[in-house]
Image (tube, rainbow, N blue to C red):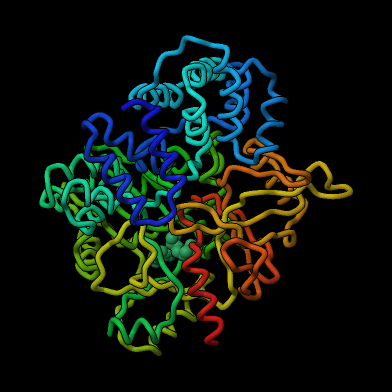
Amino acid sequence: MDFLAFSRICESLENTNGRLDMTAIVRDALSSLDEADLPLFIRYLMGRTFPDWSQEKIGIGPNSVYDAVAYVAGRDRRAVVSTVNRSGDPGRAVESLLAKKEQMSFFSESLTLGDIGHDFTLLAATGGSKSQKEKDRVLRRLFGNASPLEGRYLARLLLGELRIGIGEGTMRDAIAGAFSVSPAAVEHAYQAANDLGEVALIAHRGEDALYAVHIEPFRPVKMMLAKQGTVTEMLSEAGVLAAEYKYDGTRFQFHKAGGICRMYSRKLEEVTHAIPDVVEMLDAATPHDIILDGEVIAVRDGRPLPFQYVLRRFRRKHDVASHIEEITLRPNVFDILWIDGETLIDLPFAQRRERLDAAVSDAYVAPQLVSGDEEEIDLLYRTALDDGHEGIMIKNPRSPYTPGVRGKLWVKIKPAVDTIDLVITAAEWGEGKRAHIFGSFLLSCLGDDGSFIPLSKVATGFSDEALQEMYAALSGNILSEEGKMVHVEPEIVVEVGYAEIQRSPNYTGGFALRFPRFIRLREDKSPEEIETLRMIEERFAAQSAR
Ligand code: AMP
């Protein structure tokens, strides 16, 4: 497929509002694609450049994109940046700059989805000292061959936000419609394969093929997530609960197959080299080929240390050995997804737990209480807090493992401070001695269609050090500036506390946080995992009920 045809579809989706109409446009497009284009079309339409499980990253910031466009349009970077600032949308700014260029040039090659895929792989593979030059060359060629409309979507794709509102749900339904299979089968295959592009290829072969999709080692699957809730509520639903400590550390997924071990973070990034000690412990803990889910914590004298200690280890790229001595890590395994070629995620949790106990040394398996007695569970909660943990997790013993789903099958119980994870989408320059860094931040939640919806500004709770850290994290991600406000790529997730959720006409989502306060950076979370507008509506309703 030509990238121009792809861009036209993007444009018509951008001009369409209803979800059903959008699904129909995507469905019709899918039916006409060949096997090579199908996965690329799906990934790109969702604003992703590689499969969700992949370690490949194009690693391009706004500055590289603006430089390439400046070169191609025969302008300087300042002119590009000021066009972006005026329009507030890098995509449309690039489009208008390329439109001026187009009047002058006569020769350019047409781009196909395959060309884009090839160049993205090249960008991801380019490393080392000469890498920036090579990346610049690829970007100039891409924008040099792009028509204005293609430029709009190419720029947005490179910057990680396509702004056409195709969420996973819409794509799932479109695939189901295009290949006459059920959305549930598509969802099932997606949970195991973790790439809707590949799932569409399988959907071609029918419903049974989708249900036969297996997890594969070294292709991490999304982590199952938890909601807030109460023991009483969960007990009345499930009768009996599996309760475990809620460890305040960092989530991991451990893969072992054919003598090779790899560790993945919650964002599914490989972290094997940052925590070789934990990898070794788990390797020794089982003779099986296996995929395990758990939380790693830092310990000193048998007690857990705050979460920041673990993050420090996950972040380290150099000098890992000396930090192993400083900070002792300990894995707590609480689930098993795959063993010796067998996918286990559809089994009820109680059965998975039996398989886990049989396969892994109990030194690293999280202790579990199975009980239908509320008092007994409350006692476990108090012990967890006394022992320095965050609270408890209660799980429905009959539940399958649902990758990427935040449902009520797992519920977290922790002391009542209301906190929320949101992504930073803009920042404002500080004042006085903070004039050279950012002083406040616009926080957004996730809409149904995958867009980011502003919810609140936060300016309190930051130490000077934290503000420096925020500046360092955001300054390379600036998309555009508007007065004192700077729009940034939605990448940095923060946890904030708040007193109340209120209705607000000032934000498009209709809600705002009262007294928001910065608590910590959540480098372990990706923007797709933050609070959704629906969850905020639920919180609002629960709060009104109280
Ligand atoms: P939250 O990050 O507040 O949404 O809480 C869910 C997180 O708690 C999970 O993603 C895990 O990283 C962590 N966690 C700690 N202990 C457990 C446990 N026993 N079972 C599941 N998740 C746990």
- Do we see residue 498 in this rendering? yes
The correct choice, above or below, for 228 with respect to 110 in the image is: below
Question: Which quadrant of the view contains residue 111?
Answer: top left
Left or right of residue 495: residue 405: left
Left or right of residue 101: residue 198: left
- Do we see residue 247 in this rendering? no
Which quadrant holds the N terminus?
top left
Q: Indicate the position of residue 301 as horizontal and vertical percent values.
A: 54, 62
How many numbered circles does the render carry?
Answer: 0
Q: Indicate the position of residue 509 as horizontal and vertical percent values.
A: 56, 63
Pick whichever, 534 or 477, lies toward us: 534
Q: Residue furthest front?
A: 103
Going 67% across and 18% down the picture, which residue do you hit?
75
The correct choice, above or below, for 178 with respect to 76 in the image is: below
Q: Where's ligand 1: which quadrant?
A: bottom left
Q: Indicate the position of residue 374 as horizontal and vertical percent values.
A: 38, 88
